[in-house]
């Protein structure tokens, strides 16, 4: 454009009559320069008006209450949807490296989808459950699948592998039924709404600048042109208000129907956890008959603890209040004082004494010296 301008100026300076082609080029260049000048002037006016509004030195057109409410609701919907998506992605794939790789391959897939090349697929990752299944099977076979412990490890490995498969199904259903539609909502609907909001803000600034120009115009000749310009900007602003209102209303209505995506996510989670309970229950039933006869109670029941060679069940422990003072007679007993609150556990085969826990110390006390709470 600059080179063409120099050519036109040189022709004009020489006084020669420009050719038809040169005249066409001259007219086209002048139109470009005029359009550039108009855009620059408009941008300068907008920046000036925006700055004066920020400084509180210019009046600002206020949106109606309904539009303000729609704008606030849309912003909340956008923010809450983004946070919800981030949390669900973290639940479905806790590994940040795997999430980054999935996003990278997703971007590559979008770029290559329009080309003839086959889009690259992400490498399959083993879930923690699948890794545990592989290790359990390997260790079980190393111990010997014919042994009790080896067979137990192999059976547990099979269950963990099926849980890993269920986890992959949960991830796939979560992505397709929850993450994908909400991401499309953000990238299409919300982005369009944000663009309409920006357009509305530009129209408002143009309108406020035109109002300010009318107030500052003193010449009777120019005031009619300024008022005509103001009417044009007012009409453009009103049209943009209605267009923005329509888009925002659709956003709010669409957001209300998103409960279906959440329902699909809950159904996928329910199916996953149901599969986990089913697999673990089957493992527990499969190993219970063979292990109940060989494993000690303290191994099969994690609530069993031992004091002075006596096995006690923590599930039977109760709170009690001491009725009388009692002084320990040997190392197996513990001293207590009246009105003291303590924890007692029944001793199997001995109804005359309880095992008491006093200040972290265990010892026997007479059963008739306390009252259960």
Image: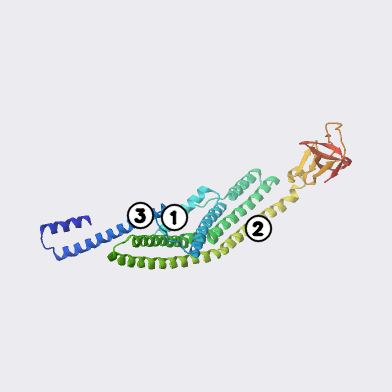
N-term mark: 2 or 1: 1
Closer to us: 128 or 100: 100
Residue 266 in picture, x, y percent from top left: 61, 60
Say which quarter of the image contains residue 356: top right
Q: Secondary structure at mark 3?
A: helix
Q: Nearer the viewer, mark 2 or mark 1?
A: 1
N-term mark: 3 or 2: 3
Residue 362 falls left or right of residue 130:
right
Residue 304 in picture, x, y percent from top left: 76, 43
* Residue on which disc 2 sits: 274
* Residue on which disc 1 sits: 107
The numbered disc on residue 48 is: 3
Q: Nearer the viewer, mark 3 or mark 2?
A: 3
Q: Secondary structure at mark 2?
A: helix
Mark 2 packing: few (<14 Cα in 10 Å), some, or many (20+)? Answer: few
Residue 90 in picture, x, y percent from top left: 55, 51
Closer to us: 126 or 73: 73
Residue 263 falls left or right of residue 282:
left
Residue 62 falls left or right of residue 95:
left
């Amino acid at each position: 454009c600059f080179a063409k301008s120099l050519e036109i100026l040189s022709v004009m300076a020489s006084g020669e009559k420009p050719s038809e082609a040169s005249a066409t080029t001259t007219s086209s260049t002048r139109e470009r320069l005029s359009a550039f000048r108009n855009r620059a002037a408009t941008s300068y006016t907008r920046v000036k008006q925006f700055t004066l509004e920020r400084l509180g030195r210019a009046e600002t057109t206020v949106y109606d209450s309904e539009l303000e409410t729609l704008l606030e609701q849309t912003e909340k919907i956008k923010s809450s949807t983004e946070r919800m998506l981030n949390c669900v992605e973290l639940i479905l794939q806790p590994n940040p490296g795997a999430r980054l790789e999935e996003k990278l391959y997703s971007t590559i897939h979008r770029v290559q989808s329009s080309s003839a090349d086959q889009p690259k697929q992400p490498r399959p990752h083993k879930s923690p459950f699948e890794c545990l299944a592989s290790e359990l099977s390997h260790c079980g076979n190393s111990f010997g699948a014919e042994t009790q412990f080896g067979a137990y490890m192999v059976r547990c490995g099979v269950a963990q592998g099926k849980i890993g498969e269920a986890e992959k199904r949960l991830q796939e259903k979560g992505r397709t039924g929850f993450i994908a539609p909400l991401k499309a909502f953000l990238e299409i609907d919300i982005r369009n709404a944000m663009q309409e909001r920006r357009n509305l803000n530009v129209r408002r600034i143009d309108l406020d600048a035109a109002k300010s120009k009318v107030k500052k115009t003193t010449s009777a000749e120019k005031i009619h042109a300024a008022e005509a310009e103001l009417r044009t900007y007012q009409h453009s602003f009103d049209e943009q208000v209605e267009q923005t209102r329509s888009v925002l209303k659709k956003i709010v209505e669409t957001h209300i129907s998103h409960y279906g995506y959440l329902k699909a996510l809950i159904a996928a989670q329910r199916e996953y956890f149901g599969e986990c309970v089913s697999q673990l229950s089957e493992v527990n039933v499969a190993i219970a008959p063979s292990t109940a006869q060989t494993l000690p109670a303290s191994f099969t029941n994690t609530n069993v603890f031992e004091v002075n060679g006596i096995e006690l069940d923590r599930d039977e422990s109760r709170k009690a209040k001491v009725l009388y003072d009692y002084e320990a007679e040997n190392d197996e007993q513990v001293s207590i004082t009246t009105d003291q609150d303590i924890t007692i556990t029944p001793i199997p085969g001995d109804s005359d004494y309880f095992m008491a826990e006093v200040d972290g110390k265990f010892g026997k006390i007479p059963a008739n010296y306390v009252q259960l709470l």
